[in-house]
Image: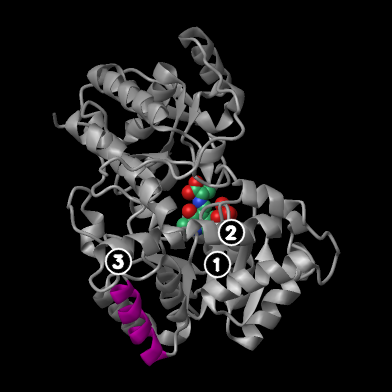
Amino acid sequence: MHTIIEPFRIKMTEPLPITTRGHREAALAAARNNVFLLDAEHVTIDLLTDSGTGAMSDRQWAAMMLGDESYAGSASWRRFEKTVREITGFKHIFPTHQGRAAERILAATRLKPGDIVPNNSHFDTTRANIEYVGARAVDLLAPAGRDLYSNKRFKGNMDLSALERLIETEGAKNIPFCMITVTNNMGGGQPVSLENIRSVKELLGKHGIPLIIDACRFAENSFFIREHEPGYSDRSLLEIAKEMFSLADGATMSAKKDGLANIGGFFGCDNDSWAEDFRDLLILTEGFPTYGGLAGRDLEAIAVGLMEALDCEYQRYRHATVEYVAARLVSRDIPIVRPPGGHAIFIDAAAFCPHLTPSDYPGIGLVNALYLEGGIRAVELGSVMFGKPAASGGEIAAPHELVRLAFPRRVYTQSHFDYVIEVLDLVRRQRDRIKPYRITKQAPFLRHFTAHFAQGEIEAKRGA
Ligand code: F0G
């Protein structure tokens, strides 16, 4: 059979708001042209994030009824711990309320001002938590990953020679740990090969630097390895995931992605003294170590969800959905990052809007056009999210102006995605009308969440 079907049927439905253009114009104006500030009830297809937005299975809902809400030592904790240990093999496992809580405690307990943490690409909260304690987050993505259009596989791989140079120039003692993000969200959701993780681990091992995996999308990464890395096509996703974690000294995890849950996360590690420091701060800020800021029922949902994410049929359908949309966007001349990632499609907004410069924030223009045209919510990953103040005044633009269409898990059907394709096609044909935006209000960090924008007028592109 060529047709890959959703390996589930739908038992419960949730109405989608169908809105008019006038309604959307008023909603976006009230949200100061920032889709993060929209009320979700004004959004028809919400592709803002794949985080915590998935649909749980009947098994997960059933497991939640078994939630043991004891403060300490609950049966739900035991089931959670057993599952996480089976997948990761870590000696110490700590639940947290989401991924960034694990990052924050890891950064606070292991880093001091001036330290350096390399990663293929830091997610924004990971970077912010590292920088918050005065350390430096360095991205060392291999060159193929920086080329948006190369069809190479494993474009999330780390640049080994850059890592080697960094260790030589900065000194291993100033690098308390190195991270690898699977899949590489900030770099187009691209996977990392086991071969690359193994080589990174070998290099770090020579210098005594621990490796921490940012494991949010570990199951999607495992599927990419099964499909595209030689020698893995007959291995189960669980076996591949186990091999991946066996190369790491620890992992931070947001269960809102491949935990198929709406909230939750964890940190795991082997080192006893790391665990002790982590536990102390966890108790102070998240909760007792057997619940870590979660309800017993959340632990149950995650324990079931982690294993469902490792079901090959589920991953086959999920990846087929992303590829289905990607192929149709490419055939309509919509510039997207290739090959498509595991959880999202990333549109090159700079190429989509050739009449705009980075300082016009083309990503915001495209995001807002998608909302106004079809009630679709996407997110900018460009100079609003990553732009930096320049010493001379003004701003240093981000390396790319991307817009991410993230795919919530098990939520939208093929006709929803056909609609997304149609809206994008329409927006592309009217792209000359996409206006520049400027920021009228912003916070000192993570400004994209709360900034206010105003529309400007299109000027002739500099140098054009
Ligand atoms: N690491 C990566 C690679 C992520 O993508 C995220 C979250 C986190 C860490 C933090 O996890 O949200 O549970 O605290 N990514 C979401 C996104 C928010 O939309 O990509 P969290």
User: Mark 2: which secondary structure?
Assistant: helix
Image spot of residue 73 (x, y percent)? 81, 72
Relative height, residue 136 to residue 171 (above, below): above
Q: Give the crowd class for mark 1: few <14, some 14-19, many >=20 residues within 10 Å.
A: many
Q: Amino acid at mark 2?
A: Gly
Judge from the rendering whether residue 274 lies leftward or rightward of residue 297; answer left or right: left
Q: Where residue 336 appears, x then y in whole percent?
A: 25, 40
- Ligand 1 under 8 Å from disc 3 Cβ: no
Under circle 1, the secondary element is: strand
Residue located 33% across and 17% down the image: 457
- In the shown orientation, is residue 219 left or right of residue 433? right
Mark closer to the chain start, 3 or 1? 3
Return the x and y of residue 71 as percentages of the image width and height: 85, 65
Which residue is the site of mark 2? 99
Q: Quadrant of residue 201?
A: bottom left
Q: Residue furthest front?
A: 1
| Image point (56%, 52%), residue name | 260
Q: Is residue 94 visible?
A: no
How packed mark 3 is, by other alpha carbons closer than 10 Å (few <14, some 14-19, many 20 or more), is many
Q: Which residues are magenta?
A: 194-207
In terms of sequence position, does the residue under pointer 3 or pointer 2 come before the other?
A: 2
Label 2 beta carbon within 8 A of ligand 1: yes
Frontmost residue, 286 versus 344: 344
**Residue 42 percent coordinates (x, y):** 57, 21
Indicate yes or no: mark 1 CB to ligand 1 under 8 Å.
yes
Q: Tell me whether the residue at label 3 lies in contact with that at label 1, contact meaning CB atoms closer than 8 angstroms.
A: no
Q: Cβ–Cβ below 8 Å for labels 1 and 2?
A: yes
Please, what secondary structure does the residue beneath circle 3 have?
loop
